[in-house]
């Protein structure tokens, strides 16, 4: 097996079909594949850092990382860091995984000056991450945010997967819309031109909902804002986006944005317009997106992706656990850069042991203050 370390700006294009084939062979999710990551590199201020293991001419493992120098410290992250709900170290087997972990550890330990590594949203038990945590003196694996999903069986009607309470709530709200003469109109957009035409309204509703929740919209971030539009349109061009919209009186009231990833519909972003909040437009639009996915015979699951929102767990029958890999060049760097995370973990432990604090925290989350923004815009 042979190691290659690639850092040129066009590295993903250079690897091209060989990398695509590795991703296909290892069922790498859409948010960790080449089109998504190339869009991320064009939007965020990081330089590519790719380590690949070859067996002859074939790629057998890859670590798609990125780095930047900040405040005198080299920060190494997974490509896609931030907006990607799932990250991967694709590998064709244990031998390749161990070779890749050794290569990444060697690169990090050979860096001059302080550094830190953060790779979140890896699948639990990932062999590369497990071996890396053992190889790095100040490396550790921590639990990540779970991703709920609704996995489909032979039953292909929505009623077979949702609770009676959910079904009645959707019917009651829909009947109210009809009585008020709002004529709810759903659309499922897949064509690139239709998605491009819808983006301005989507972004407006996203910002309005974020303002309602008293939080800064990620769309206002100078890097994430352009990425949001670019990644949707790039995957629309590839036929990998399905957007469900609800219009009331011709106005966009809610949307549910999914990436079509093989047999999975992966819900990455959904919002509703505050004007229509009293009609629960987000609930009925997500319900319609689920119904639409069930009608697609190629679809076997609706993946709600990263996030702890109650509406997701209520429409899920499976939870995909995740983990994060963290590492630092020294104990001093660990102390400086991991202090905030350890403080939050400590506060959460205190909160979980006291019922009064737990209820107060739930109230704060309900207002949108103090809410943890997910790594991707999946709420």
Image: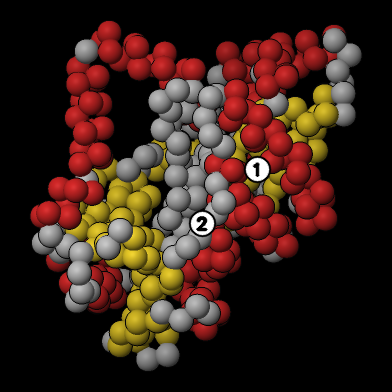
Mark before the other along the chain sequence, 1 or 2: 2
Identify the residue at image location x=44%, y=65%: 46
Image coords of residue 176 (percent x, y): 78, 10
Viewer-closest of 164 and 52:
52
Q: Quadrant of residue 277?
A: top right
300 relative to 330, above or below: above
Label 2 near label 1: C-beta < 8 Å? Answer: no
Quarter of the image with the N terminus is: bottom left
- Asked if residue 293 lies left or right of residue 162, the reply is right
* Whole-percent x, y for residue 230 in the image: 65, 58
- Residue 191, image x, y percentages: 80, 54
The single residue placed furthest to the front in the displayed view is: 71
Circle on res. 257: 1
Above or below: residue 50 compared with residue 71: below
Work out which quarter of the rendered image holds the C terminus and state it: top right
Q: Secondary structure at mark 2?
A: helix
Give the residue drawn at x 52%, y 83%.
Answer: 14
Q: Is residue 341 above or below residue 358?
A: below
Q: Position of residue 68 (x, y in %)?
A: 37, 65
Q: Which residue is mark 2?
A: 31
């Amino acid at each position: 097996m042979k190691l290659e370390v690639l850092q040129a700006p066009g590295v993903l294009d250079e690897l091209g079909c060989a990398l695509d084939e590795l991703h296909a062979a290892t069922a790498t999710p859409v948010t960790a594949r080449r089109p998504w990551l190339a869009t991320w590199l064009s939007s965020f201020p990081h330089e590519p850092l790719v380590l690949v293991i070859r067996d002859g001419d074939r790629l057998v493992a890859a670590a798609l990382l990125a780095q930047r120098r900040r405040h005198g410290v080299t920060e190494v992250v997974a490509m896609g860091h931030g907006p990607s709900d799932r990250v991967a170290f694709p590998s064709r087997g244990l031998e390749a995984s161990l070779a890749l972990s050794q290569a990444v550890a060697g690169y990090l330990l050979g860096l001059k000056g302080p550094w830190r590594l953060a790779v979140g949203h890896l699948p639990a038990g990932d062999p590369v991450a497990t071996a890396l945590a053992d190889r790095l003196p100040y490396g550790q694996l921590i639990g990540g945010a779970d991703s709920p999903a609704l996995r489909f069986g032979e039953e292909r009607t929505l009623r077979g997967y949702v609770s009676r309470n959910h079904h009645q709530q959707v019917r009651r709200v829909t009947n109210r819309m009809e009585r008020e003469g709002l004529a709810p109109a759903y659309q499922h957009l897949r064509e690139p031109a239709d998605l491009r035409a819808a983006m301005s309204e989507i972004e407006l509703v996203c910002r309005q909902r974020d303002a309602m929740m008293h939080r800064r919209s990620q769309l206002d971030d100078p890097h994430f804002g352009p990425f949001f539009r670019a990644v949707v349109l790039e995957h629309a061009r590839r036929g990998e986006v399905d957007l469900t919209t609800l219009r009331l009186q011709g106005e966009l009231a809610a949307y549910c944005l999914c990436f079509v990833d093989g047999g999975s519909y992966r819900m990455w972003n959904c919002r509703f317009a505050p004007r229509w909040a009293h009609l629960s437009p987000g609930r009925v639009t997500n319900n319609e997106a689920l119904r639409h996915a069930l009608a697609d015979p190629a679809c076997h699951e609706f993946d709600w992706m990263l996030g702890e929102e109650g509406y997701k767990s209520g429409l899920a029958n499976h939870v995909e656990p995740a983990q994060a890999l963290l590492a630092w060049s020294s104990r001093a760097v660990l102390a400086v850069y991991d202090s905030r995370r350890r403080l939050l973990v400590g506060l959460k432990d205190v909160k979980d042991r006291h019922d009064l604090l737990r209820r107060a925290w739930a109230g704060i989350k309900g207002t949108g203050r103090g809410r943890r923004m997910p790594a991707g815009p999946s709420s």
